[in-house]
Image: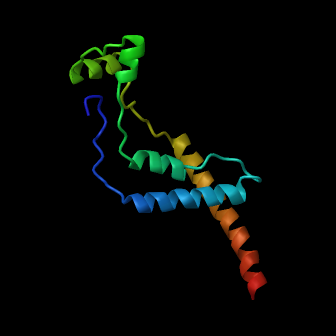
């Protein structure tokens, strides 16, 4: 929040997100050889974010002599802010509208051209 981002307020069940990740993997498997894309989510990513992780610095202290430095949260936020981190102002121009509208119409045209032969074939 110190960098200007809103704290997430929506919570999704892990099983729902895991199922969505599974569907994206299936779509990638079916369509990936024709149109290569990265799945939005994978089951591995969902699992890694849904599991509590524990870390210890003992090995780094023992073998490397590492000693962590203490920083306040405000110092860390200022460090990130000084390097340009935080939400960037967005401007939505008429070109964005034209592009998005064209992509939407293209998507509709592809869906209709795919659905009409499928419906005709089943009749």
Quick check: 56 left or right of 45? Answer: left
* Along the line of sight, the residue nearer the viewer: 29 or 93: 29
Q: Quick one: quadrant of the C terminus?
A: bottom right
The x, y position of residue 14, in whole percent, is 40, 58
Left or right side of 42 for 83 = left
Q: Residue at x 33, y 20 (%)?
A: 81
Residue 13: x and y, percent?
A: 36, 60
Residue furthest to the front: 62
Where in the figure is residue 70, as x and y percent of width and height? 24, 16
Q: Quadrant of residue 71?
A: top left
Q: Is residue 15 left or right of residue 95?
A: left
Eyeballing the image, is 42 above or below 75?
below
**Residue name at image x 29 percent, y 32 percent:** 4
Residue 77 visible somewhere in the drawing: yes
Q: Quadrant of the N terminus?
A: top left
- From what the image shows, is residue 47 above or below residue 86? below
The structure residue drawn at horizontal position 71% and vertical position 47%, both measured from the top left corner, is 36
Classify 79 as above or below 101: above
* Count of numbered marks: 0
Q: Nearer the viewer, residue 84 or 109?
A: 84
Q: Nearer the viewer, residue 107 or 76?
A: 76
């Amino acid at each position: 929040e110190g960098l200007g981002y809103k704290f997430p307020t929506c919570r999704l069940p892990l099983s729902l997100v895991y199922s969505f990740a599974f569907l994206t993997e299936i779509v990638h498997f079916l369509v990936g050889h024709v149109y290569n894309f990265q799945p939005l989510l994978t089951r591995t990513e969902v699992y890694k974010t849904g599991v509590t992780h524990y870390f210890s610095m003992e090995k780094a202290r023992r073998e490397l002599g590492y000693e962590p430095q203490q920083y306040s949260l405000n110092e860390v936020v200022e460090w990130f802010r000084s390097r340009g981190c935080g939400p960037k102002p967005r401007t939505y121009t008429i070109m964005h509208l034209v592009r998005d509208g064209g992509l939407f119409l293209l998507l509709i045209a592809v869906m209709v051209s795919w659905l009409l032969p499928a419906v005709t074939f089943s009749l």
